[in-house]
């Protein structure tokens, strides 16, 4: 499976129960991912890594509440509770996530003025993270995605991966969703229409 990579999306304390932006059952993905990982030659992790006062935080927009939407220069942006602040305990990976064999950690969301759901591009859908080039140079053709959350960072990563020509699979048993106003069903439909394999 040298041409296959497992990309683990944002399995961080703030997205797990008790965290600032907890995904229901978020910690349940950890043993599933730990069991999957040895079957892949390439293991990569993403880490949400926001500076304080990030533009995607509701607290940076007076009068706005978390989960409301605002318009940014690159389009609509959901506003979130402050989460995954650089160097904080909440930004750390879940302590039980086995990271020993991870060859690369992609940090995203570190630019103050733009959010980043996808492991491949910022939310302007133009600014690359470099992951696509990294995988291509190593001969990776197939990517499997797992982690948090299904309907945001996992889905956008899968869509961008497919757009870049990778055969993309999302392992639903190794993901959990936020499901904001029907976002899970909407993103599952978008992924299937884009040729992403839902496993």
Image (tube, rainbow, N blue to C red):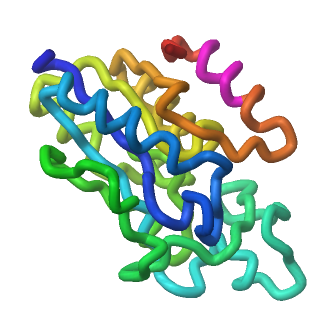
The answer to whether residue 189 is magenta is: yes
- List x then y, in percent, for residue 180: 80, 46
Q: Is residue 116 above or below residue 56?
A: above
- List x then y, in percent, for residue 101: 13, 44
Q: Which segment is the magenta one?
A: 187-193
Let me know if residue 120 appears in the view.
Answer: no
- List x then y, in percent, for residue 28: 51, 42
Q: Is residue 41 above or below residue 26?
A: above
Nearer the observer, 138 or 40: 40
User: Residue at coordinates 60% horizontally, 39% vertically from top-left?
Assistant: 176
Nearer the observer, 132 or 145: 145
The answer to whether residue 166 is magenta is: no
Taking 101 as reference, is 195 left or right?
A: right
Taking 125 as reference, is 78 left or right?
A: right
Q: Is residue 5 above or below residue 54?
A: above
Q: Is residue 150 above or below residue 77?
A: above
Nearer the observer, 65 or 71: 65
User: Residue at coordinates 89% horizontally, 84% vertically from top-left?
Assistant: 63
User: Residue at coordinates 36% horizontally, 15% vertically from top-left?
Assistant: 167
- List x then y, in percent, for residue 193: 63, 13
Nearer the observer, 89 or 111: 89
Let me know if residue 56 appears in the view.
Answer: yes
Image quadrant in which the N terminus is located: top left
The quadrant in which residue 66 appears is: bottom right
């Amino acid at each position: 499976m040298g041409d296959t990579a497992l990309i683990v999306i944002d399995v961080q304390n703030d997205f797990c129960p008790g965290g600032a932006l907890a995904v229901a059952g978020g910690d349940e993905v950890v043993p599933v991912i730990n069991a999957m990982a040895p079957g892949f030659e390439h293991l990569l992790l993403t880490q949400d890594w926001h500076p304080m006062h990030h533009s995607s935080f509701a607290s940076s927009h007076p009068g706005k509440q978390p989960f409301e939407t605002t318009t940014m220069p690159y389009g609509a942006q959901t506003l979130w509770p402050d989460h995954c602040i650089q160097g904080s305990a909440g930004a750390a990976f879940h302590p039980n996530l086995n990271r020993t064999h991870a060859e690369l950690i992609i940090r995203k969301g570190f630019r103050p003025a733009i959010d980043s759901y996808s492991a491949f591009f910022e939310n302007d859908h133009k600014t690359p993270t470099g992951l696509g080039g990294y995988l291509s140079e190593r001969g990776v053709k197939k990517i499997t995605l797992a982690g948090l959350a299904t309907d945001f960072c996992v889905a956008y990563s899968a869509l961008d991966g497919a757009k870049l020509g990778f055969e993309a699979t999302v392992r639903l048993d190794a993901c959990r969703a936020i499901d904001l106003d029907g976002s899970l069903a909407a993103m599952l439909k978008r992924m299937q229409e884009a040729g992403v394999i839902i496993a």
